[in-house]
Amino acid sequence: MYDDALRPVNLRTTQFSVLAHLNGSEGVRVRDLASGLQLEETTLTRNLRLLEQEGWVATRAGKDRREKHITITKAGQEVLAKAVPRWRAVQERLQQRVATTTWDAAFRTLPKLAAGAAPD
């Protein structure tokens, strides 16, 4: 549902999540971004490469040359602004289809499941 809604603005759900996570920050280390999104760094790196090709994120070296910092660009903010209403519409539609208690339980449970799936 989310990918279908975001297709007209050329975003996938995973890309939307990355841009939303970066929005409002002054730059995030790739390692911290991966942790925050609960993604493997290699998976995130592939997603970032596509976002960078679109001009939606920029990469700069950190103090340690091995460290990379990612920021959302103005173009990334613009595509995110177009995507947010589409994402919210799907969110609302999905919420209407699911009982409130189920919805609330899912959001209480998801962080626990993600924590359980995190690498040791």
Image (tube, grey):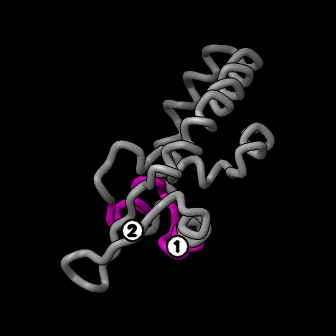
Residue extending furthest toward the bottom: 65
In magenta, the rendered stretch is 28-46
Q: Secondary structure at mark 1?
A: helix
User: How far is the residue under mark 1 from the one under mark 2?
Assistant: 8 Å
Q: Position of residue 36 (x, y in %)?
A: 40, 54
Q: Quadrant of the C terminus?
A: bottom left
Q: Can residue 63 be found in the magenta stretch?
A: no
Q: Which residue is mark 2?
A: 30
Q: Quadrant of residue 33?
A: bottom left
Q: Is residue 67 above or below residue 98?
A: below
Name the one closer to the observer, 14 or 6: 6
Q: Is residue 25 left or right of residue 76?
A: left
Residue beneath the point at 72% across and 24% down: 94
> Residue 23: which disc?
none
Q: Is residue 2 left or right of residue 115?
A: right
Mark 2 belongs to which amino acid? Val
Of callouts 1 and 2, which one flags the residue occurring earlier in the amino acid sequence? 2
Residue beneath the point at 61% across and 16% down: 101
> Residue 45: which disc?
1
